[in-house]
């Protein structure tokens, strides 16, 4: 474990070396949060209701902030793995005394964590200004645990997409489709609560809702039962996808041919 | 005429280059159509639940989203380096274009094609068809509106990327500006108050890439067409001026490069 923690720490320090760059990238969340505020302010006013399906304008905005934080902070891991496969640098990594997937997990988590903190602080400042104070901070610890689960689950899916580079030339299409499925079934732009019941049922049964909707909904309405249900779903998906990932990784290595160098 | 011939030759070479890997080309093109279709489902779900946003309905959204996608696709397909111009400037890669007897900006921008751009471009027409507003006349208006929207979008990118002449690496700013332009272009214009609308016609001209061309596609009005032309001419002129001003400050390590 120590070596993976060291990888985590080195990546963290690397990224911390350029705080202005981190801050600059975090500003990306501002136009999104501002336009969401416009959209939901007008929509709630047109509906003539203070609260729709248990969400107000303020709670919808805080929900969207956390969902956006999770989405914007996750690294483009699929491309990192696919590049390593395509340019052959995977051969260099495989000779090192660590597991290829755990190496990427430690490094990705470190980068994600920093981006997440910056995105949340920058976006949160704007949302606070627009709609008022965030939800009760007492619920933040369970939310942080589920956000970690969300990023781990995202890692499993992204790594699977990255490994597909062993069999296809270009993984872009898979990346796009995964991202958009996460948008729709994860409730990134519209909370799942506003979906028709049949679509909510489908979305809740898929892993995408455990990545975005679960943690974001818990953030605005914290409860022990919501925490346990979100975490339970995440662990179930992480377990299932880890098995698929381990299998795909072993199969992928069978395709690999390294010629000297 | 010579410039047009040169452009056509460049585009032909680019197309041959991206089509060298047929499977990858098709995957990217079809993947992008699928990507946009899935993304648009968000609006289908939204308007199923909330009907309209200050009078802006799903039909308007199909056309707006379609125009923005086609304009984006056209720029990435024909002038793919518009997205990398800042990098080209900061890395001194303009040297290559400066050393040849062709218009520097045009040559640099058209030297790259992104295969997925064809998917974006085609998706726009599918979106127009899905709106139920497709007629031969509206398809023609859509095509003209897309061309003008693409000019505005490309000009905006040139303006933002040209900041690299003064600021050096400006990747974060470019990313924010590009994302803001695309995001604001695909949201209903009726969301915004007058101050925001002024910004969307000037500082971040997203209204000229989404709402206004969509309005022209839905119903022909000379005034809207005039606004679109004026916007495209002004932004393109400004972009060329700023690029030329930046070019006078350009310096590099005179590295010898081979463009492949």
Image (tube, rainbow, N blue to C red):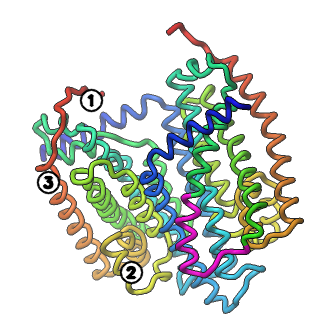
Residue A164 place in picture, x, y as percent: 64, 32
Residue at position x 14%, y 45% in the image: B103
How packed mark 3 is, by other alpha carbons closer than 10 Å (few <14, some 14-19, many 20 or more), is some
Residue under pointer 2: B197
Residue under pointer 1: B259
The quadrant of the image that shows the N terminus of chain A is top right
| Secondary structure of residue under mark 3 | helix
Residue A101 place in picture, x, y as percent: 68, 31
Q: Seen from this angle, which residue lies furthest bottom?
A: A48
Report whether mark 3 lies on the same chain as mark 1.
Answer: yes
Residue B179 place in picture, x, y as percent: 44, 60
Report whether mark 2 lies on the same chain as mark 3.
Answer: yes
Magenta extent: A118-136
CA gap, disc 3 to disc 1?
A: 23 Å
Q: Earlier in the sequence, mark 2 or mark 3?
A: 2
The reply to whether residue B47 is in sight is: yes
How packed mark 1 is, by other alpha carbons closer than 10 Å (few <14, some 14-19, many 20 or more), is few
Task: Relative to B78, say whether B16 is above or below.
Answer: above
Residue A125 drawn in magenta? yes
The reply to whether residue B34 is in sight is: no
Residue under pointer 3: B244
* Magenta span dominant secondary structure: helix
CA gap, disc 2 to disc 1?
A: 42 Å
């Amino acid at each position: 474990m120590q070596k993976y923690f060291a990888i985590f720490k080195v990546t963290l320090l690397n990224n911390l070396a350029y705080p202005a760059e981190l801050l600059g990238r975090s500003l990306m969340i501002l136009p999104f949060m501002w336009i969401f505020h416009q959209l939901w302010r007008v929509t709630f006013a047109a509906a003539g209701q203070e609260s729709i399906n248990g969400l107000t304008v303020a709670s919808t905005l805080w929900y969207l902030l956390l969902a956006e934080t999770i989405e914007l902070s996750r690294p483009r891991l699929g491309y990192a793995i696919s590049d390593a496969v395509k340019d052959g640098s995977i051969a260099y990594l495989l000779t090192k005394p660590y597991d290829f997937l755990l190496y990427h997990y430690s490094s990705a988590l470190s980068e994600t964590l920093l981006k997440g903190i910056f995105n949340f602080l920058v976006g949160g400042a704007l949302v606070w200004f627009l709609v008022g104070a965030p939800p009760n901070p007492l619920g933040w610890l369970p939310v942080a645990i589920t956000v970690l689960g969300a990023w781990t689950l995202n890692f499993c899916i992204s790594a699977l997409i990255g490994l597909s580079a062993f069999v296809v030339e270009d993984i872009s299409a898979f990346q796009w489709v995964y991202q958009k499925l996460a948008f729709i079934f994860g409730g990134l732009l519209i909370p799942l609560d506003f979906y028709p019941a049949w679509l909510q049922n489908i979305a809740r049964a898929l892993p995408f809702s455990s990545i975005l909707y679960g943690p974001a909904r818990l953030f605005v309405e914290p409860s022990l039962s919501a925490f346990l249900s979100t975490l339970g779903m995440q662990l179930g998906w992480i377990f299932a996808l880890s098995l698929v990932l381990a299998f795909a990784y072993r199969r992928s290595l069978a395709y690999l041919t390294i010629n000297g160098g | 005429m010579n410039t047009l011939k040169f452009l056509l030759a460049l585009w032909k070479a680019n197309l041959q280059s991206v089509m060298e890997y047929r499977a990858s080309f098709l995957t990217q093109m079809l993947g992008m159509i699928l990507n946009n279709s899935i993304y648009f489902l968000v609006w289908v779900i939204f308007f199923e639940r909330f009907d309209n946003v200050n009078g802006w309905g799903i039909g308007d959204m199909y056309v707006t989203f379609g125009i923005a996608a086609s304009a984006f696709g056209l720029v990435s397909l024909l002038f793919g380096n518009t997205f990398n111009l800042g990098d080209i400037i900061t890395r001194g890669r303009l040297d290559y274009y400066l050393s040849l007897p062709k218009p520097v900006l045009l040559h640099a921008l058209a030297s790259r094609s992104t295969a997925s751009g064809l998917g974006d471009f085609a998706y726009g027409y599918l979106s127009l068809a899905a709106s139920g507003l497709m007629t031969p006349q509206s398809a023609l208006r859509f095509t003209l509106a897309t061309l003008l929207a693409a000019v505005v979008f490309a000009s905006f990118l040139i303006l933002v990327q040209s900041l690299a002449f003064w600021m050096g690496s400006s990747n974060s700013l470019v990313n924010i500006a590009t994302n803001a332009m695309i995001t604001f272009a695909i949201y209903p214009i009726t969301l915004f108050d007058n101050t925001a609308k002024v910004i969307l016609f000037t500082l971040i001209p997203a209204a000229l890439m989404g709402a206004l061309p969509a309005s022209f596609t839905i119903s022909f009005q000379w005034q809207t067409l005039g606004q679109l032309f004026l916007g495209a001419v002004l932004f393109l002129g400004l972009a060329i001026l700023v690029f030329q001003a930046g070019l006078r400050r350009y310096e590099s390590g005179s590295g010898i490069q081979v463009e492949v």
